[in-house]
Image (tube, rainbow, N blue to C red):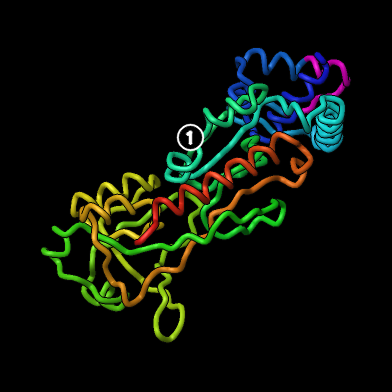
Amino acid sequence: MAYVKLIQMFVRVYELGSMSAAARDQRTSPAVASGRISELEKHLGVRLFNRTTRSLQPTENGRLFYDGAQTILQAIADAEAAVADAAKNPRGVLFVGAPLGVGRRFVAPFVPAFKAENPLIDLRLRLSDRIIDLTTEGLDVALHLGRLEDSGLKMRVIAECPRVLCAAPSYVQRRGMPVDGAALVRDRHDCLNLRFPGAKEFQWTLQTPDGYQKFDISGPFEIDDGDVLTQWALDGHGIVMKPLFEVAPHLRSGALVKVAEATPPLPVTLSILTPHRRLRDPKVQLFSDFIAQHCKRALEELTRDL
């Protein structure tokens, strides 16, 4: 098992490109991470990384060893799953990712219930509105809001979620009620955008009588946190495009009102993403089934009659 830990550390250093990042991922110190890599290099008799004070790059031997190391770790994981009576008693640590809004509403509230039903599984939940790379970040499963572009992932659709354009009544009183997407552009309405590194949606795609159309909206604020974006809208700073489930309570209370209803946004797909190599892991399947069921129920309750 000691040698396996050396290989695990090597793989994480290789994938994350940083000794300190790999140490955090493996819940240890950079000194321990560096020691494990040095021990592995000594055992193999080759250098796996070229290190400087500013960079860490795999050598040719390191690149060759990485492919075999992945195969070894996956073989061990498959063997453990086969002998652990995993179908009845799944166990281990499950790393789960989700966007902030989705995670707070549809994952975090149900984690204790999942743990109560599956006491041998520990969950590590990571929430972020930025684009997440499951493989690089070591995630077993992630909830995703949007299109799937990475063919290396398996997608399980939970629901098609309607989206709305909305703003605070104070904003509408001050700037007027836009009737459609053309009015958003023509009257230069303050549109609040969710933007983050790697984001590709810099226009709003809306449904018009002539089909889908992209509108070059503009606005004073951008952020990579969807809940902050909603708060800016509540404070009267502009118009947001949000999944209906995220703003449903505010629409019911009147704190936000729908705008530009003649050209509603496209719905967005809520799905569960899983690396193909994780599909045979029983705890991944168990969690996927559990969270899909609870998500559907929560979505229906949040958006009923809206």
Residue at 48% from the left image edge and 42% from the top image edge: 106
Q: Is residue 190 left or right of residue 248?
A: left
Few, some or many residues within 10 Å of mark 1 (<14, 14–19, 20+): some
Residue type (three-letter) at the residue carrying disc 1: Ala
Residue at 58% from the left image edge and 27% from the top image edge: 115
Query: Is any part of residue 196 visible from this angle?
Result: yes
Looking at the picture, how far across and down is residue 159, in whole percent? Answer: 54, 58
Which of the 4 image quarters holds residue 77? top right
**On the image, numbered disc 1 is attached to which residue?**
108
Which residues fall within the magenta stretch? 39-49
- On the rendered image, what quadrant is the N terminus found in? top right
* Residue in the foreground of this view, choosing between 52 and 34: 34
Tell me if residue 164 comes above or below residue 59 in the rendering: below
Residue most extreme to the bottom: 210
Tell me if residue 42 comes above or below residue 206 in the rendering: above
Q: Is mark 1 on a helix, strand or loop?
A: helix
Q: Is residue 8 left or right of residue 125?
A: right
* Residue in the foreground of this view, choosing between 187 and 227: 227
Q: Is residue 296 left or right of residue 304?
A: right
Looking at the picture, how far across and down is residue 290, in whole percent? Answer: 61, 40
Q: Does the segment drawn in magenta span residue 233?
A: no
Query: Is any part of residue 61 visible from this angle?
Result: no
- On the rendered image, what quadrant is the C terminus found in? bottom left
Residue at 58% from the left image edge and 31% from the top image edge: 114
Looking at the picture, how far across and down is residue 168, in whole percent? Answer: 20, 57
Looking at the picture, how far across and down is residue 42, in whole percent? Answer: 84, 16
